[in-house]
Amino acid sequence: MKIHKAVFPVAGLGTRFLPATKASPKEMLPLVDKPLIQYVVEEAIEGGIKEIVMITGRGKNAIEDHFDISFELEHTLRGKNQNGLLEEVQRISNLVDFCYIRQKEPLGLGHAILRAKDVIGNEPFAVLLGDDIIYSDIPAIKQLIDVYEEYHSSIIAVEEVEKRDISNYGVIEPKEVANGVYRISNLVEKPLPDKAPSNLAIIGRYILTPEIFNILENTKAGRGGEIQLTDGLKGMLSHQVIYGYKFKGKRYDAGNKLGFLKATVEFALRRPDLGEEFREYLKGLKLTE
Ligand code: G1P
């Protein structure tokens, strides 16, 4: 079955970016001039996704507005003959079909995904987490869809990370079955470095079979008192095979300050309209005391 729908859990509070995120969603923080969430939405569309289900929360209306028509702005840009900008804002609102569901309480990633049960129905679907920005030739979610089409099982994006960082991630116990494809025998959410079953961390891209919903309904709160997707996937292992896939591309953890800064600098350096001047600026940079 083809993957048409994607779930974007965007209800997180963004406490790591306070005060910037006190009144605006962390997903709207820009890398250069484009909000984080738009990079991930564009990745999904390039991967063939036709419908995006955003799991939102209070204070996240800016995301809905961003992907909607803006009459006033379009009228003003048209009046000023700023056609390039007009096309860009119109393009954003025509990207894809969106559906918004509220997660009333922040009870975890598994709980957020479960909110999409009725809209997704009985078909496999993608999940994309906005904190992970992936720069790649082939969109990361498309790479996972291609692996799904070969194995017809849930597929999770994984990446090797340093031991000292492993406790920030879900971690898989892998057995490599093909180049970069791992059959998973166990998953642990945010283990201590010495308890981690490998150095392969779960990155925020998943293709999930719909059986995950019934399992999440029966998954108890785990780490941090939240219903964890990783625990749901562990529960699914007794019914279905799940694979990890080491995607090709560079991943930025835009959910923390250092990762966000690295992404900002590198995306700016890649921009044809800014890159050269910005590189010169960085080369000559001397901070005054
Ligand atoms: C979530 C998942 C975790 C995964 C991570 C990837 O954690 O629970 O398994 O490794 O996303 O970004 P979070 O970063 O939301 O705490």
Image (cartoon, rainbow, N blue to C red):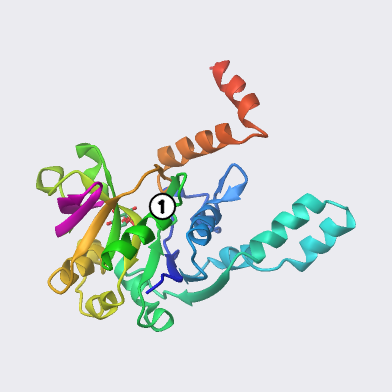
Q: Is residue 184 left or right of residue 138?
A: left
The location of residue 126, given as percent across then percent down, is 39, 66
Q: Nearer the viewer, residue 186 or 130?
A: 186
Residue farthest toward the left in the current orientation of the protein: 195
Q: Nearer the viewer, residue 179 or 29?
A: 179
Q: Is residue 278 left or right of residue 264?
A: right
Q: Nearer the viewer, residue 63 or 215?
A: 215
Q: Nearer the viewer, residue 276 or 230?
A: 276
The location of residue 102, given as percent across then percent down, is 46, 75
Q: Is residue 258 left or right of residue 108?
A: right
Q: Is residue 80 visible?
A: yes
Magenta span: predominant SS is strand
The magenta span reads: 169-186
Residue that numbered label 1 is attached to:
140
Q: Is residue 287 visible?
A: no
Report the image quarter containing ligand 1: bottom left
